Image (cartoon, coloured by chain):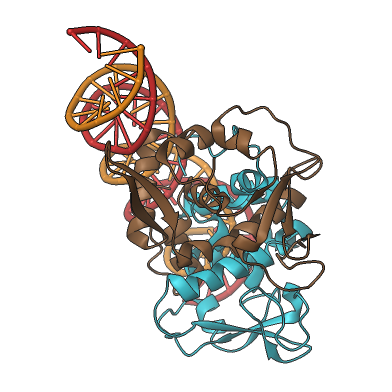
Chain colours: A brown, B cyan, C orange, D red
Amino acid sequence: MALGKNYEGQQCALARALELVGERWTLLVMRDALYGVRRYGDFLAHLDIPRAVLSQRLHALVEAGLLTRHRYQEAPPRDEYVLTEAGRALWTPVYTLSQWGERYAADGEPMRLFFHLPCDAPLDMNGACTACGRHTEPQEVEVRPGPGVRFVREDAVSVAMRRPHRLLDPLP
Amino acid sequence: MALGKNYEGQQCALARALELVGERWTLLVMRDALYGVRRYGDFLAHLDIPRAVLSQRLHALVEAGLLTRHRYQEAPPRDEYVLTEAGRALWTPVYTLSQWGERYAADGEPMRLFFHLPCDAPLDMNGACTACGRHTEPQEVEVRPGPGVRFVREDAVSVAMRRPHRLLDPLP
DNA sequence: TAGTGTCGGTTCATTCATTGAACCGATGAA
DNA sequence: TTCATCGGTTCAATGAATGAACCGACACTA
């Protein structure tokens, strides 16, 4: 996104949201974070994003309060980027947009399937469990490979996601 | 969004969705279209978007099948941009992202309130009616000004939205 | 009939973000 | 000592966004 990431004239919550997560790559970074990706190198390899852009986005997301930086090792110093509550709350928008894409922008069968763990039932298009009807928190959801997925990528994250994985659990 | 609007490496429905609606301004155009805006000049005045960008976005959205161009007057020739089914289906992602923004990115009280017309009950954060529990279609939803809104903009669309308005109904 | 205004654009120079390759510093392993 | 890894930063080139100016078709008015 170029020239003014902000939409100042818009007196609208959507504009405020897009100022935080509307730039190119940002929502894909957040999706990966919801999947459980936490480390710079894993984002980098999984997203094929330019290093400079990834640095800028991670710092901006920490600044915006969607991620926190947590040192998990002292020598050499290594940080991981973990979702805050605001970041985890992006699960619903990310999921609904993803489902829209699955239905209207992608062709073929679903690439990923999402299940409500307590019920072992799939989610509907809106993110509600088809069994209990409740809206889901990410930590109650499991991603499984769908019929339309092809195992072509060989980065650590893609390989780890070839088997079912609970959202937010560290990946890979 | 610069240099390659596409995310080719990503085998992910979210990436497909963002290729269609992830560019700067695009989601705000779609939000306006869901509100009922249909004409070039109204988008222009309400969004404060550069004319060239608006032209490009409207054409891209028609190309992508989210809008159709419909001639509503012959002399002089005038077209309006109307949502397709795929465009109307963006209601849920737009609403959930908007609600996320209202909660985590905006401060103060809600700027807009959304009601399920058949029940006259507000929607919850996920787009379900708090009375009947069903997920809503845009044509069943009414937007009303919320306690946090300030009537500062004077363009035709902003003025029309100072009173309750059913989504998709032509605006202004 | 000329002049003016509106609508829906296009064109253009400037400014800025993205890209991808190269570089860098700290550390650990051989 | 050398080499590799991790997590960045720097830099030149490219291309998108911006905003002002321009434009063509038509309507309305004097």
The structure residue drawn at horizontal position 77% and vertical position 45%, both measured from the top left corner, is A110
Q: Is residue B27 visible?
A: yes
- Given residues A2 and B42, the one toward you in this image is A2
The structure residue drawn at horizontal position 52% and vertical position 37%, both measured from the top left corner, is A47
Q: How many marks?
A: 0
Q: Is residue B38 visible?
A: no
- Given residues A33 and B45, the one toward you in this image is A33
- Residue A151 position, x and y percent, is 70, 30
- Given residues A163 and A133, the one toward you in this image is A163
- Looking at the picture, does residue B31 appear above or below residue B58? below
With C25 as the anchor, is A167 left or right in this view?
right
With B133 as the anchor, is B49 left or right in this view?
left
- Given residues B69 and A85, the one toward you in this image is A85
- Residue B170 position, x and y percent, is 68, 75
- Residue D27 position, x and y percent, is 63, 68
The picture quadrant where one finds residue A142 is bottom right
- Residue B145 position, x and y percent, is 54, 87
- Report the quarter where the C terminus of chain B lies: bottom right
The structure residue drawn at horizontal position 60% and vertical position 61%, both measured from the top left corner, is A139
- Looking at the picture, does residue B151 appear above or below residue A147? below
The structure residue drawn at horizontal position 61% and vertical position 70%, both measured from the top left corner, is B95
The picture quadrant where one finds residue A106 is top right
